[in-house]
Amino acid sequence: MNAGSYRCPTDPARSELMRRVRRQGTKAEQAVAAALRGLGVHFRRNVKTLPGSPDFVNRSHRWVVFVHGCFWHRHRNCVRTTTPKRNRKFWLDKFSANEQRDRKKALVLRAMGFDVLTVWECETGDRRKLSRRLEKLLGVR
């Protein structure tokens, strides 16, 4: 058996939970979209022609916004950034790869002339605070 093809058995409940995790259209993304619309900012969603398929893009103003889940993208010092105890090495490797991929796509986008903004899932709960942060980061008045 190829070393890369081995998959550790998982429990069915965990598999079902992971199957329900969404990649797009999350509540956090919806909150950011509402905040951007409230600021009168125009954007495109999930632009696959740019590195990392940013969640929100405005090409004319040269900015992209990624909405990251705290668990998957390892938001530092956030209570949602937990590591499962079962199959710990797998998870640590996966999280490390996610972080490296995030850094790489941000670097490439910056080299292309884009401002890259990251909004964390935990920052989307307070709508006013989120709008103020986006306003400040995007230079909207």
Image (tube, rainbow, N blue to C red):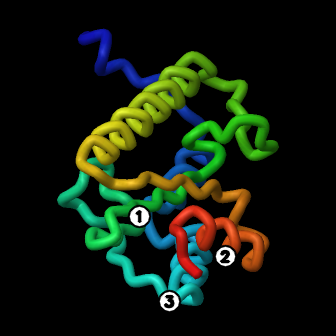
Q: Earlier in the sequence, mark 1 or mark 3?
A: 3
One can see residue 5 in this view: yes
The quarter in which the C terminus is drawn is bottom right
**In this picture, residue 38 sits left or right of residue 117:** right
Question: Is residue 16 visible in the rendered structure shown here?
Answer: no
Residue 119, image quadrant: bottom right
**Numbered badge on residue 103:** none
Secondary structure under tag 3 reads loop
Dividing the picture into quarters, in which one does residue 56 lie?
bottom left
**Spot occupied by residue 70 in the image (x, y as percentages of width and height):** 65, 47
Crowding at dot 2, Cα within 10 Å, few <14 / some 14-19 / many 20+, comes out as many
Distance (Cα) linking label 2 and label 3: 11 Å
Q: Is residue 66 above or below residue 32?
A: above
Q: Position of residue 25 (x, y in %)?
A: 47, 72
Of 22 and 4, the residue lying toward us: 22
Which residue lies under the disc numbered 1? 55
Neighbour class for label 1 at 10 Å: few (<14), some, many (≥20)?
many
Q: Pointer 2: what residue?
A: 131
Q: Which residue is mark 3?
A: 40
Q: Residue at x 34, y 70 (%)?
A: 61
* 119 to 140, vertically: above or below: above
* Picture coordinates of residue 108, whole percent (x, y): 28, 40
